[in-house]
Amino acid sequence: AQTVTQSQPEMSVQEAETVTLSCTYDTSESDYYLFWYKQPPSRQMILVIRQEAYKQQNATENRFSVNFQKAAKSFSLKISDSQLGDAAMYFCAYRSTSGTYKYIFGTGTRLKVLA
Amino acid sequence: DVKVTQSSRYLVKRTGEKVFLECVQDMDHENMFWYRQDPGLGLRLIYFSYDVKMKEKGDIPEGYSVSREKKERFSLILESASTNQTSMYLCASSLPFPGTWGAYEQYFGPGTRLTVT
């Protein structure tokens, strides 16, 4: 069974600095999708960035980028030029490309942004 | 934009009560999900529905049931609420799989924080 591990329950970053949130996963599949979701204090979870496993190029969305290491089964999120609005819970998630409907979520990392 | 709404942001119920949590999405999505979110445990899937009147159990279905009579609405039912069901409940929807790349993204509602006393 697939698992997703976020080993950092909480992280802090100074405003305008860069922070990296880690995520590792375990799977025997070769093709899958990976996501980072953000859950601000208002609780509406939104998608930050996504990555297809067969693509070697790391996904980037403005200040958010990932470091996808398929062999190491690692999918870290880098936030550049951190802003106060980046403070939130961040969840890493895995989804198979097979018929299963399940998304596997990590336990989350709470990011604090210090002014 | 996809919008997923949940009937209540906060709910307080007594042990033994029957509780209904409602979720509505406006993007004609086939798939809808109910998750439970607890600190340190992440999101755990309770039930999933891939079509009207179709449902599948997730990882923690015990003590819960669901209803999907219309495509846009997915209800979570706590038949007899217990204190260990105090939690944040999140609803989500997505396009069917397999499909286009965008089909794999889930859209979430704001959540319902349920307290059972």
Image (tube, coloured by chain):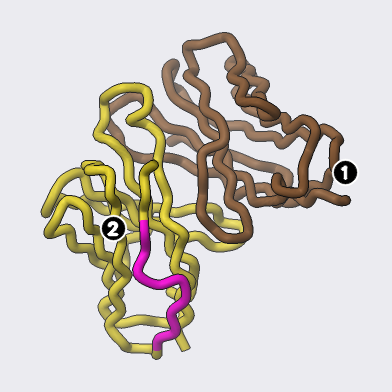
Chain colours: A brown, B yellow
Q: Is residue A98 above or below residue B35?
A: above
Quadrant in which the N terminus of chain B is drawn: top left
Determine the secondary structure under disc 1: strand
Front residue of B105/B28: it is B28
Residues at badges 2 and 1 in contact (C-beta under 8 Å)?
A: no
Determine whether, in the image, residue B13 is placed left or right of residue A3: left
Based on the picture, tell me whether residue A15 belongs to the magenta stretch. Answer: no
Residue B24 image label: 2
Q: Is residue A2 above or below residue B78?
A: above
Chain bearing mark 1? A
Determine whether, in the image, residue A101 is placed left or right of residue A52: left
Q: Position of residue A66 (x, y in %)?
A: 65, 24
Magenta segment boundaries in residue numbering: B5-13
Q: Position of residue A72 (x, y in %)?
A: 64, 19
Q: Amino acid at mark 1?
A: Gln
Chain bearing mark 2? B
Q: Are callouts 2 and 1 both on one chain?
A: no
Instruction: Determine the residue positioned at 55% across, 30% down.
Output: A49
Residue identifier under label 1 = A14
